[in-house]
Each structure stands twice: as structure tokens, then as C-alpha cells.
Amino acid sequence: MVGSAVTSGDVDVIRAADRERAVVTLTLAFASDPLARWNWPDTYQYATSWPKFVEAFAGRAFDHGTAHGLDNCRAVALWLSPGLGPDEETLMEVARDSMDGKVFQDTMGLFEQMDAAHPTVDHWYLPVTGVDPVAQGHRLGSTLMQHALAICDSEGLPAYLEATSPRSRRLYERLGFDVTEVIQSGTSPPVWAMLRPPRS
């Protein structure tokens, strides 16, 4: 999934210089996400904690050339290649330092269930993807997904993700993902584990 510089209309790898821009897009994209705002209901708490969470959860995509951007990072998808996972130590540290006590405990329950639901075969994992709200509705997110899924198909590998809203779940279902498990812990909103087998 490696490419050259991002140009308007083309999906490509996000350059190091655009890493912060990409995280800002994801921060805007998830500002009303049910799970993200359950984790951080206070606006300031969300705005200062979510970027750190994204870096720990999916930042390795930037380091491994699997962070995709479209239209000057107005749409972003951070993919982790087979065998690559989140920075779990930093992820736990960010969650513990930024979440309220009960929310943190329930989030740990979510993480445990997410780990258990993860495929055990080689797969591409999409921890986070999003589109700047002012650019939504123009198929930027779908274009990013179709680009990556074509590569998954060419490699004969499944794609896996967790949908955190009914709207995103429906989008992923249209792209061929099936719900494999519904994850929920304590007071958390539901999270849908979703898998898409490779297509020949």
C-alpha cells in the first residue's frame, strides 16, 4: 500500500509532513462518534486526548507507509499490515490518564473483547478512518476504502475493523464487511467487529 505524494483526487501514502494534518482530520471526523465521545464527553478533554489516542492506536501506519490520504488529507485511513498492531502500552497510558475511572474500566473491558474478536489469520486491520465533516457525502471515504480493499484482494487477505456507529456499520456492510461480533462493556455504546473476506 505504498505510494508517492498525495495529489487531489488520488489516494496515496501520507507524508511525514502531513501526519499532524491527518490526525486533525480524524479528530474532526470523530467529534460526534458515539464511542469517542463516551470516552471523552467533555469537549476539551476530547480535543486534547483523541489525537494522542489515534497516535497510539494507529500511528504505526504512518511509520510503515500504510496511512492513506485523499484530497489533501480531507479523508484519512490508517491501516495496519498483517502482524502489526497498536502501541498497546502507550494506548493504555493515554486511556488511563485521560478517561474517568468508570469509563476507563469499561474501556478496558472493550479492549479485552476487541482482542478476543480479532482474526487469528493474517489480515489488514483498519483501526481508524474518517473524513472532514465539511467534505463528507462526496464518496471520499468510500474511495479510500475501495483502494485498500483492492489491495487486500490482490494479496488474498481479509480486511478487519471495528465499526463504532450504526452509520459506519452500514457503510462497511455495503463494502462487503460482515458483523462477526457485537462488543459492549458496562455503559459503553456497542462496537461491531467486522470482517471482509478477500474477493478473487
Image: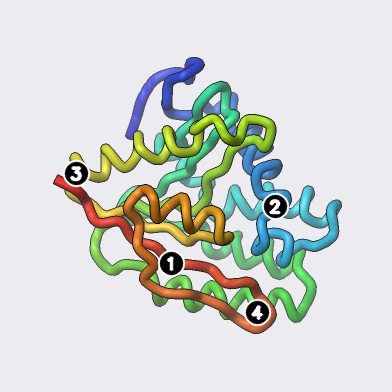
Mark 3 — residue?
Answer: 155
Q: Residues within 10 Å of mark 1 (few under 14, many from 20)?
A: many
Mark 1 — residue?
Answer: 193
The answer to whether residue 189 is left or right of residue 111 is right
Return the mark for residue 50: 2
**Residue closest to the eye, 108 or 138:** 138
Q: Position of residue 200 (x, y in %)?
A: 14, 45
Q: CA distance from mark 3 to mark 4?
A: 36 Å
Q: Amino acid at mark 1?
A: Ala
Q: CA distance from mark 2 to mark 3?
A: 32 Å
Q: SS at mark 1?
A: strand
Q: Are marks 3 and 4 in contact (CB under 8 Å)?
A: no
Q: CA distance from mark 1 to mark 3?
A: 22 Å
Q: SS at mark 3?
A: helix
Q: Residues within 10 Å of mark 4 (few under 14, many from 20)?
A: some
Q: Is residue 19 above or below residue 200?
A: above
Q: CA distance from mark 4 to mark 2?
A: 17 Å
Q: Which image quadrant for residue 158?
A: bottom left
Q: Which image quadrant for residue 37?
A: bottom right
Q: Amino acid at mark 4?
A: Asp
Residue sitting at 42 percent across and 26 percent down?
Answer: 11
Q: Amino acid at mark 2?
A: Trp
The answer to whether residue 190 is left or right of residue 142 is right
Q: Nearer the viewer, mark 1 or mark 3?
A: 1
Q: Are marks 2 and 3 in contact (CB under 8 Å)?
A: no
Q: SS at mark 4?
A: helix
